[in-house]
Amino acid sequence: MLEKLIIEKSSPGRTAYSLPECDVPVGANRGSRDFRGSLPDGSLAGSTLPIPERFLRKNTAELPEVTELDVVRHFTRLSQLNYSVDTNFYPLGSCTMKYSPKVNEDVSRYDGFVNLHPYQNEEQCQGILRILYEIEKIFSEICGMDVFTLQPAAGAQGELVGMLISRAYHIKKGRRRSKIIIPDSAHGTNPASAAMCGFDVVEVKSNSQGLIDIEALRGIIDNDVAALMLTNPNTLGLFEKDILKIAEIVHSADALLYLDGANMDALLGIARPGDMGTDILHLNLHKTFSTPHGGGGPGAGPLGVVKKLAPFLPAPGIVMNNGLYNWQYDMPDSIGRVKPFYGNIGIIIRAYAYLLSIGSGGLRKIGLNALINANYLRRKLSGYLEIPYGEKCMHEFVASTRKLREKGITTLDVAKRLLDYGFHAPTIYFPLIVADALMIEPTETETRETLDEFAAAMIKILEEAEKSPELLKNAPHTTPVSRLDEVKAARKPNLRWQKQT
Ligand SMILES: *Cc1c(COP(=O)(O)O)cnc(C)c1O
């Protein structure tokens, strides 16, 4: 049943709680937060109102009149309608919807962090500066890069900064290069970031194994290419095993190798992009490093580079001299600031707490468990779902529901039916090179039992597709609203309560 709006539950005269009559003179000791002056009944007439008359409302606000229990039940029920990693399995491929330990949330809320102001001077902020300085070193160590900037607010902004740096690098060398090469399996933000920087995007095809076609790459690399943007493991969940050869081809034209590190979960403690010839790399702290992902909250997309690109990083950098941490503004070749202050600090603190708590041994376990979980699930489903590429996968895999087409069943139908079984749907229709794609990423934080339950639900749904396809066609059946017109829901959302007349 659809939960009514709180205002629809209103009944005149109901109140949340009642207090005894006030036994001191009203208005005698009003603080600046007092808004009783806005009551339209004039009960405070004659006293010095904290709010100028012209700002006072003419009529009483139309607020719901409900009991305290009404309020508690209403909002508790609404909170339970949210789908979240805290309640259920969330195998959204490429998004790494893993569980982020609550202790890292707690740490980021310490008074010492929360009460800092970005305009405080460096002497007063040595603690946070030290954290920023150290996490740059930790990221550099994990990824094999030389220097990081923590400014970008998301992966996509990291990409943009990486593209700006690529442009600055070539301009410094006295040349303008116009092209960025991007594989056909890439995330949509990659070509968007390149285009925003004024580059032309040249697509390189994947081969029959779902990897970059090396010969095709050789065919398009020339002295007009600024960089290759690559995701590794790629969006099919496959490791680009020719990465060293790819780096060599790119570097032979003095172009740069940009690595989209959104899939870094798969490599943690196992391999380092910097050791594979990567020149620029972004991380998504809201995917890999303990910030809950989704809900539109802040994220962070730190960007690492090799030494020769460090001068172009956004200013200010951070340096340590004689045990004191300072901002470094003297960076004449910097592309400039890309974010007010120094990025989304709260997200960086979570990552710092996470990394210190797991240590390097823990990091490797995370990487290995991400691979084991994905391969376990892949194996469980491989007899039921078509999985077009490879025998093994990294941290995710891409299946296809193409065979259900003849029954009139779409990938969307399968995804919607999963909701009835209590699971969030995987990413669908991406990457574009797999028809009817279901991209499944279980992450390392799930137990074997959860993976088994998910596999069982998926297998059941595929049986339903054979025997009772109508169950899929109209799914979901158990959610507060059923199948939405998604375009209309996005373009014309109905968020406003209107009084019934
Ligand atoms: C998520 C993702 C991005 C974009 O990152 P945001 O932090 O969402 O901006 C880029 N590339 C890949 C492969 C991704 O999965």
Image (cartoon, grey):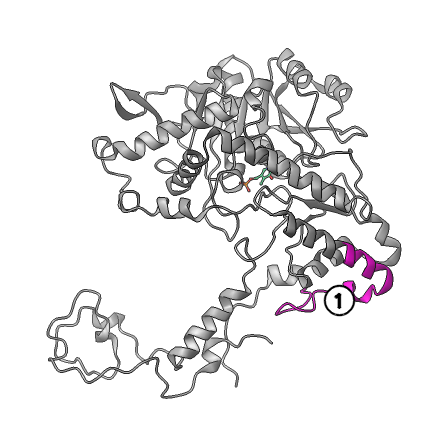
Q: Nearer the viewer, residue 356 or 487?
A: 356
Whether the magenta-drawn stretch holds residue 466 is answered as yes
Q: Is residue 150 left or right of residue 467?
A: left
Q: Secondary structure at mark 1?
A: loop
- Residue picked out by circle 1: 474
Residue drawn where x is 21% and y is 84% of the image: 20
In the image, the residue with mark 1 has its CB under 8 Å from the nearest atom of ligand 1? no
**In the displayed image of the protein, which residue is found farthest to the front?**
449
Where, quadrant-wise, is the N terminus in this rendering? bottom right
Judge the density around disc 1: few (<14), some (14-19), many (≥20) Cα neighbours within 10 Å.
Answer: few
Estimate the x, y position of residue 58 in percent, counting from the top left: 30, 79
Using the image, determine if residue 484 lies above or below residue 271.
below
Asked if residue 431 can be seen in this view, the reply is no
| Residue 171 higher or lower than 188, as above or below | above
Bounds of the magenta span? 459-485
Relative side of 374 to 173, left or right = right
* Amino acid bearing label 1: Asn
Q: Nearer the viewer, residue 35 or 405?
A: 405
The residue at the point 42 percent across, 75 percent down is 71
Q: Could you say where residue 222 lies in the image, as x and y percent from the top left? A: 68, 15
- Residue depicted at x 52% and y 47%: 99
- Please tell me in which quadrant of the rendered image residue 188 appears: top right
Question: Which quadrant of the frame does ligand 1 lie within?
Answer: top right
**Image position, residue 7 (x, y; %):** 45, 78
Question: Residue 178 colored magenta?
Answer: no
Asked which quadrant contains residue 217, the reply is: top right
Q: Left or right: 243 with respect to 19? A: right
